[in-house]
Image (spheres, grey):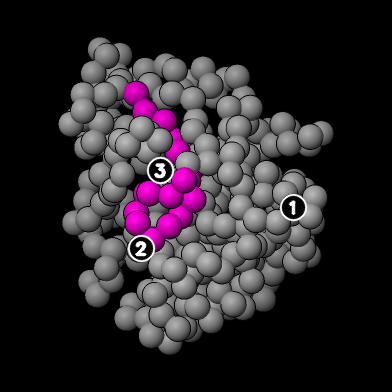
Amino acid sequence: MSENSGRRSVAVEGSRWGELILPAADEAPTQPDAGLRIVLLASFEFGYMALEAVKAYARRFPGRLTLAALVTDDPMTPTARIGLRKRVWKHMTREEIVGIETAIVEAALAAGAPVFTGEIKTPGFHALLDAWRPDAIVSCVFGQVIDAAIIGRPAYGIYNFHPTDLAHGFGAGPTPAEDLATRGMTSTVWTIHHVIEAVDSGAVVAVSPSINVADTKGTLPADPLMIYDKLVEPVGCLAACLVDALWRRSASGTPGRLDRLDVARALPADVAARLQAPIRADRHGTALPVFDPAILDAFTAR
């Protein structure tokens, strides 16, 4: 996945797959290591959008936060627990999987952040976390279960993004689009929740406004990837809102995790309007999502 010959790959103790990829010398962060330290656990287009939002926030507000590292899925490696027949990957072609996972790795490394693609329940990964010193961890489409040894580390908590209404008991697990189809639903929400050892079961911190995932005929698309295409845009707004709130909590000297977060205010009017509109595409799009830095205007004065 490396396009820069100055990068180094390092094996990590105990990991049965993957590697640690270190940025090249010319990929050092342009901003000093300062502010809230964020580790991102992310893959797929949702995770890519969250990463782009965190990077844009760090550029816009120097000193507020540092992207300490990216940990991502490795769905192409046969020995990994993240397989091609599991989760979102089963709906995608091999070429598309390689494309999106290469893009997210490149996006992190180019920003000067190390990338780990291996197993997290190992002494080696715990040592990496100790070295990265995250104040908070943000998870968005990550295929490994996060255990207690990791959950207790960041002082400001671990937060997961999930595209179903967990507050009402809907859609926990790896198949949110299939859950919508089973329940005959044509709308959903993004939920941000605390991470505990039980998957998608931590306390809910924030719920987005309702998102229309019906097509122009009022029906749910049969292709889950078309639903996910609709859901990708608000991820950037929500990720920016979360890291901004975490930075403000840290800067004020308030300890501990966020318990509540109002994310509706992070959605510009045009984004909110698009969330209510039906899906007009007739097939899944393959272009990488783009984060609009103008979204960050909302966080300047507050």
- At label 1, the amino acid type is Thr
Q: Are marks 2 and 1 in contact (CB under 8 Å)?
A: no
Which residue is rendered at x = 47% and y = 59% of the image?
41
Mark positioned earlier in the residue sequence (2 or 1)? 2
Which residue is rendered at x = 45% and y = 83% of the image?
123
Which residue is rendered at x = 54% and y = 24% of the image?
271
- Residue 64 among those drawn in magenta: no
Q: Which residue is mark 2?
A: 145
Where, quadrant-wise, is the C terminus in this rendering?
top right
- At label 2, the amino acid type is Val
Rendered view: 111 above or below 179? below
Mark positioned earlier in the residue sequence (3 or 1)? 3
Label 2, residues with CA under 10 Å away: few <14, some 14-19, many ≥20: some
Q: Nearer the viewer, residue 264 or 67?
A: 264
Label 1, residues with CA under 10 Å away: few <14, some 14-19, many ≥20: few
Disc 3 to disc 1, how far (Cα)? 26 Å
Q: Quadrant of residue 244?
A: top right
Q: Are marks 3 and 1 in contact (CB under 8 Å)?
A: no
Disc 2 to disc 3, how far (Cα)? 14 Å
Q: Quadrant of residue 182?
A: top left
Q: Circle 2 — which element? A: loop
Q: Circle 3 — which element? A: strand
Disc 2 to disc 1, how far (Cα)? 29 Å
Where, quadrant-wise, is the N terminus in this rendering?
bottom left
User: Magenta part of the protein: which range?
Assistant: 187-203
Q: Nearer the viewer, residue 90 or 196?
A: 196
Q: Which residue is mark 1?
A: 254
Query: Does the image show residue 106?
Result: no
Rendered view: 190 above or below 155? above
Q: Quadrant of residue 165?
A: top left
